[in-house]
Amino acid sequence: MLATFMEVLDTSVANVALPHIAGSLSASVEEATWVLTSYLVANAIILPMGGWFSMVFGRKRFYMICVALFTVSSFLCGIAPSLGLLIFFRVLQGIGGGALQPMAQAILVESFPREKQGMAMAVYGMGVVVAPVIGPTLGGWITDNLSWGWIFFINIPIGALSLLLTADVIHDPPYLVRRSLSSIKLDYIGFGLLALGLGSLEIVMDEGQRKDWFGSNFIVTFAVIMVFCLVAVVVWELRQKEPVIDFHVLKERNYTLATVSMLVLGFVLYGSTALLPLFLQTLLGYTALLSGLVLSPGGIAICLCLPAVGFLLRKVEARWLVVFGVTISTLGLMRMAHFTLDIDLNTAIWGRVVQSLGLAFLFVPISVVAFARIPKERTNYATGLFNLARNIGGSAGIAAVTTMLARRAQYHQNVLVSHLTPMDAPYRNMLNHAAAAIHAGGASAPDAAVRAHGMVYGMLLKQANMLAFADAFWVMGILFLAVIPLMLFVKRVGPTSGPAGMGH
C-alpha cells in the first residue's frame, strides 16, 4: 500500500502547485500543465504491461525497480532547473509509477488466503481512495509553506521504506517462472500501438477543453491516432501467442463487468474530487487549505468504513455491497447538486462525507468481483487492465467535468440574461436600489448607474456558474447509477470468496 499511496498521491498533489511551478520556471500555466499530462501519458502506457515485465524480470524485482525509479525521479523532479527537464523527469516518474498499482494488487491477491483477501484489499484500498482526497490539501499546504519541490521530495522516505519492506517480506510465487529475455519474443508492434493509442487518449482528455475539442486540428489529429491504434492493438494482441496485454481475460464475464464498473467509479471519483474544491474556491472564496479540509473528513470516513467492508465481504455477496455503495454515493452527489451560494462549511463537509461513505463500499467489492474467477497465472495481466480502466475513467471524468462547467455556465448565462430587460420590474428595482446605495456612498449618479449594472451582471455570472456546478454534480450522480444494472449481471461470488477464489 505504501508505494501505491505514494503514486496515487502524486497524480493529484501537483495540481495545486502548477501556478507556483510555472512562475518559478518562467513558463505559462498552460505550458506547465504538461507536468501533469506527461506523467499521465507515461503512466497509462506502462499500466497494462506489468504482467509482461513480471515475466521478464520476475515480479518482485520488477516491482522494486518501479519503486526505485519512481523515488529517484521524484528527487530529480524536485531539483529540476527548467520546465523541459521537469517534464522529462515526470515521464520517468510516470513509467515507474504506472506498474505499482497492478503489481501491488497482484501480490495481495496471492499473499493472503481466500478468507482474508477482503480485509487485505480493504487496507490496500485506503491508500488508493484516500490519496486523491488528501493530495490537493497536502499540495496546497506544502506550496504555501515550503517550496513546490517538496511535493516531490515527500516521496523519498516513503519510497525508501517501501523498498526495504518489499525486499524483506515479499517473494515471487513458485509458478511465476522468470524467463530469459532470449526466450521471450518482444511484441514491438503491440507495444508501439498501445503506447501511441494510450498516449494520444491521455492528450485528448487532458488538452481537449483548453483547445476547444474537435474545433482544434491538434485534438482531431490525436483523436484519429487514438481510435486507429486502440482498435488495432486489440485486433493484433488477440492473435499473438505472447501478447503484451492479454485481452482474453475479458472473456470472464465478472471481470469485464467489474472493469467497466471501475471505469465508471474512476470517472465519478476523480470528476467529483475535481469539482468540489473548484466550487469552494472559485464561487465561495475558500482558500486551498480550507477547501482541502472540506474533503478531508470524507477521507477519514473511508478509512473508518473500509475495515468494516472487509469484514462484511465474509458475510454478504460483494455485488450487493457495490449496489449499496453506489446508492449512498449517489445520494451524496444529489445533495451536492442542491448546493447554493449560501451554504455553510458543515453543509459542504456533510455532502462530501455521504458521498465518501458510498465510495468505501465500492473499491474493494468491485475488486473481489473482478478477480474471483481469474486464474492465478493471469492475475498480473488482469490487474493491469483493471487499474488502467480506473485511470482512464479518472482522466475522462476530469475532462468531462471541465467541459460541462464551461458549456453549462454559458447556457445558464444566456437563459438568465434573457430575464434582465428594462421591462422586468424586479430587475429595474434591483438596479435602482444598487445605484442609490452606490450614489449614497459618494459616487456620481451616472457612475453609480454604470457600477450598478456591473454589480448585477457579476451576480448573474456567479449564479450561472453555481447552476453549472449543480448540473455537473447531478450528471455524476445519475451516471453512477449505471453501475447497478451491471452488478445484476454478475455471476454469484460467495461471501467468503476473495479476489483469487479459484478453489471451486
Image (spheres, rainbow, N blue to C red):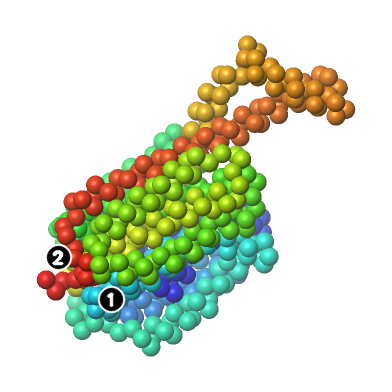
Tag 1 secondary structure: helix
Label drawn at residue 241:
2
Q: Residue at x 56, y 19 (%)?
A: 418
| Left or right relative to 44: residue 239 | left
| Residue visible at 68% across and 65% down in the picture | 145
The reply to whether residue 313 is visible in this rendering is yes
Disc 1 marks a residue whose amino acid type is Lys
Circle 2: element type: loop
Of circles 1 and 2, which is in front?
Answer: 1
Task: Determine which of the numbered discs, if any, sits on residue 476 in the image.
Answer: none
Q: Which residue is mark 1?
A: 116
Q: Earlier in the sequence, mark 1 or mark 2?
A: 1
Does residue 159 sit above or below 309 in this rendering?
below
Q: Residue at x 27, y 78 (%)?
A: 112
* Residue 412, image x, y percentages: 52, 28
* Amino acid at pointer 2: Lys
Q: Is residue 67 above or below residue 335?
A: below
Distance Cα–Cα, label 1 vs label 2: 35 Å
Q: Farthest residue toward the right? A: 442
Q: Name the spot of residue 304 as percent of width and height, x first.
A: 44, 67
